[in-house]
Amino acid sequence: MNELLEKPRRVYVSRKIEFNAAHRLFNPDFTDEENGEIYGKCSNKNGHGHNYLLEITLYGVVDPATGFLFDLKELKAILEEEIIERFDHRNLNLDVPELRECVPTTEVLAVLIWDILEQRLRNINNREIALHEVKIYETGKNSVRYLGE
Ligand SMILES: Nc1nc2c(c(=O)[nH]1)N=C([C@H](O)[C@H](O)COP(=O)(O)OP(=O)(O)OP(=O)(O)O)CN2
Ligand SMILES: [Zn+2]
């Protein structure tokens, strides 16, 4: 074993993916006026779209045998299956069952993506790997980070 990895080395490993989706920010419990006041143009009846940039970060100890925390090829495949399949080219209000009763803000999307990935990693996690952060850029300027709290 390389002496570099003789003691546990804790690292953060990230991968970015992009998907595009439409949404409308609208709460049916509010009046149209209230929705307009709170969400402005984002509550327009026919919705609008975003090119979301998602960055997932894992945390844990480098495996001394492989030199990996987690194979990024495997993470890429998981993100394709769990995120792209679910969200890409979808209407978040209509096509994602978990969001039907929610206002699909970036905060809510980050929490949902956390729950999906946390569950998926738990099922394959026989090593010390944790989901550390879900970060979503909704626009070039607006982003949300969720660390599972
Ligand atoms: N806390 C949040 N605030 C807002 C969210 C959100 O998810 N969480 N979302 C939106 C809208 O989805 C909206 O589409 C964002 O658009 P906008 O504010 O116009 O964003 P831009 O960065 O493109 O705006 P600029 O005009 O370029 O500044 C609103 N708020
Ligand atoms: Zn929006």
Image: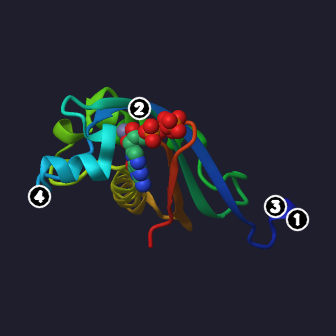
- Which amino acid type is shown beneath numbered disc 3? Met
User: Which mark identifies residue 1?
Assistant: 3
User: According to the image, label 4 marks what residue?
Assistant: 29
- Residue 140 spot, x, y in % from top left: 57, 36
- Which amino acid type is shown beneath numbered disc 4? Asp
Left or right position of 148 against 23:
right
Mark 2 or mark 3, which is nearer the start of the sequence? Answer: 3
User: According to the image, label 1 marks what residue?
Assistant: 3
Q: Is residue 78 visible?
A: no
Quadrant housing residue 110: bottom left
Point out the quarter of the image occupied by ligand 2: top left
Label 4, secondary structure: give it: loop
User: According to the image, label 2 marks what residue?
Assistant: 50
Q: CA distance from mark 2 to mark 4?
A: 25 Å
Residue at the spot 25% in from the left edge and 32% down from the top edge:
47
Answer yes or no: do the residues labelled 2 and 4 have beta carbons within 8 Å? Answer: no
Label 1, secondary structure: give it: helix
Q: CA distance from mark 2 to mark 1?
A: 47 Å
Q: Ligand 2 closer than 8 Å to the CB at disc 2?
A: yes
Label 3, secondary structure: give it: loop
Label 2 or label 4, whichever lies nearer to me, is 4
Q: Is residue 75 above or below residue 51?
A: below
Label 3 or label 2, whichever lies nearer to me, is 2
Label 2, secondary structure: give it: strand
Q: CA distance from mark 4 to mark 3?
A: 60 Å
- Which amino acid type is shown beneath numbered disc 1? Glu
Residue at the spot 12% in from the left edge and 52% down from the top edge:
31
Answer yes or no: do the residues labelled 1 and 3 have beta carbons within 8 Å? Answer: yes
Depth check, front residue: 103 or 82: 103
